[in-house]
Image (cartoon, helix red, strand yellow):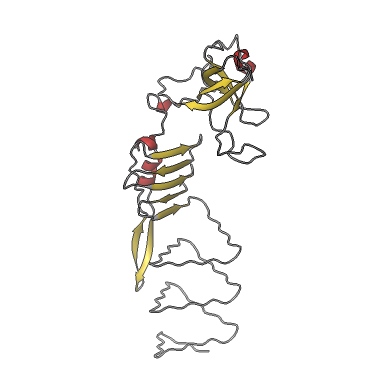
């Protein structure tokens, strides 16, 4: 490293397709590179190496992957070869408040013209969810698409239960939000009285833990769970299951069901009970009602 002069820079990422897949990017640096892409094409910019935090090992795949900034991101770094300025290293991104679309023909802009996003111009780069804004966010879509389920209430009747609404009430600066390019989201919300943990997939599947410790899981596609060994579930309250389609249960060993009070079974169609061995019915008082009754 050249220690004669420590050279800082700030600039804009114009290329992140690192052929070595090391997280390197090409940065057009203020005061070092012209904005004229005819004189200095993006392809002629040197590759800049990322610095990761000490919480990441950054060796043989251990630690965090050094990816995150997109083309159009403003960054800060230094040249480890000093005034020669051919070996850039970058270690931070710079947030701002974009006021105009990218000009892909000029330097210091996203060459794809994607960033900054047009519908977020004149807003801080801070995520809307972190700022307590819900307009055109997943909070709106979640509140508009609450699920309803019908559960038995005895005697063949049913009652309706509605999916709990998200308790989102974030206040800046207590909600830490991560959002990916396609819309995957993680929230760690420390807003007093509205503390939440939230993971959201862009398709609409999410898990949200509410301030009181309640959890809502919503899966918009299929769900597949595998337990290789034992599975133990203790539910101290009531269990409600609503299945719109069929239900199939296969048990390879014995099945034991113990109910301390009553069992109420109601089928609008037939009930078939088949035993390859003996079938025992025992009760203090057994009643059979039907017309006709056929015992074979």
- Which is more toward the observer, 248 or 208? 208
Give the residue drawn at x 41%, y 89%: 286
Instruction: Please provide percent x and percent y for residue 12.
Output: 52, 20
Give the residue drawn at x 42%, y 39%: 176
The vertical placement of 106 against 284, above or below, is: above
Give the residue drawn at x 42%, y 62%: 242
- Which is more toward the observer, 57 or 253? 57
Q: Which of the 4 image quadrants contains residue 53?
A: top right
Instruction: Please provide percent x and percent y for residue 154.
Output: 35, 72
The vertical placement of 65 against 212, above or below, is: above
Q: Which of the 4 image quadrants contains residue 37?
A: top right
Q: Quadrant of the N terminus?
A: top right
On the rendered structure, is 190 left or right of 12? left
- Which is more toward the observer, 232 or 105? 232
Q: Furthest residue to the bottom?
A: 284
- Which is more toward the observer, 7 or 99? 7
Instruction: Please provide percent x and percent y for residue 90.
Output: 56, 25
Instruction: Please provide percent x and percent y for residue 98.
Output: 42, 22
On the rendered structure, is 58 left or right of 158? right
């Amino acid at each position: 490293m050249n220690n004669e002069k420590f050279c800082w820079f700030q600039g804009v990422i114009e290329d992140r397709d690192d052929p070595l897949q090391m997280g390197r990017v090409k940065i057009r640096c203020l005061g070092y590179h012209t904005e004229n892409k005819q004189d200095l094409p993006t392809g002629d910019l040197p590759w800049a190496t990322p610095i990761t935090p000490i919480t990441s090992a950054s060796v043989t795949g251990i630690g965090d992957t050094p990816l995150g900034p997109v083309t159009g991101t403003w960054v800060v770094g230094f040249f480890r070869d000093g005034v020669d300025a051919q070996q850039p290293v970058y270690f931070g991104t710079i947030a701002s408040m974009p006021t105009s679309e990218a000009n892909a023909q000029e330097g210091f802009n996203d060459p794809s013209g994607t960033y900054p996003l047009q519908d977020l111009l004149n807003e801080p780069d801070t995520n809307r969810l972190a700022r307590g804004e819900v307009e055109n966010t997943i909070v709106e879509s979640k509140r508009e698409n609450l699920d309803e389920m019908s559960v038995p209430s005895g005697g063949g009747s049913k009652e309706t239960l509605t999916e709990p609404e998200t308790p989102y009430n974030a206040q800046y600066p207590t909600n830490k939000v991560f959002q990916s390019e396609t819309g995957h989201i993680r929230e760690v919300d420390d807003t007093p009285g509205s503390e939440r943990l939230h993971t959201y997939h862009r398709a609409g599947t999410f898990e949200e833990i509410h301030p009181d410790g309640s959890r809502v899981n919503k899966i918009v596609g299929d769900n597949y769970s595998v337990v290789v060994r034992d599975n133990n579930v203790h539910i101290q309250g009531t269990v409600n299951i609503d299945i719109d389609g069929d239900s199939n249960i296969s048990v390879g060993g014995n099945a034991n069901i113990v109910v301390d009070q009553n069992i109420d079974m109601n089928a609008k169609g037939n009930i078939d009970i088949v035993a390859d061995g003996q079938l025992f019915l025992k009760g203090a008082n057994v009643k059979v009602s039907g017309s006709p009754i056929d015992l074979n």
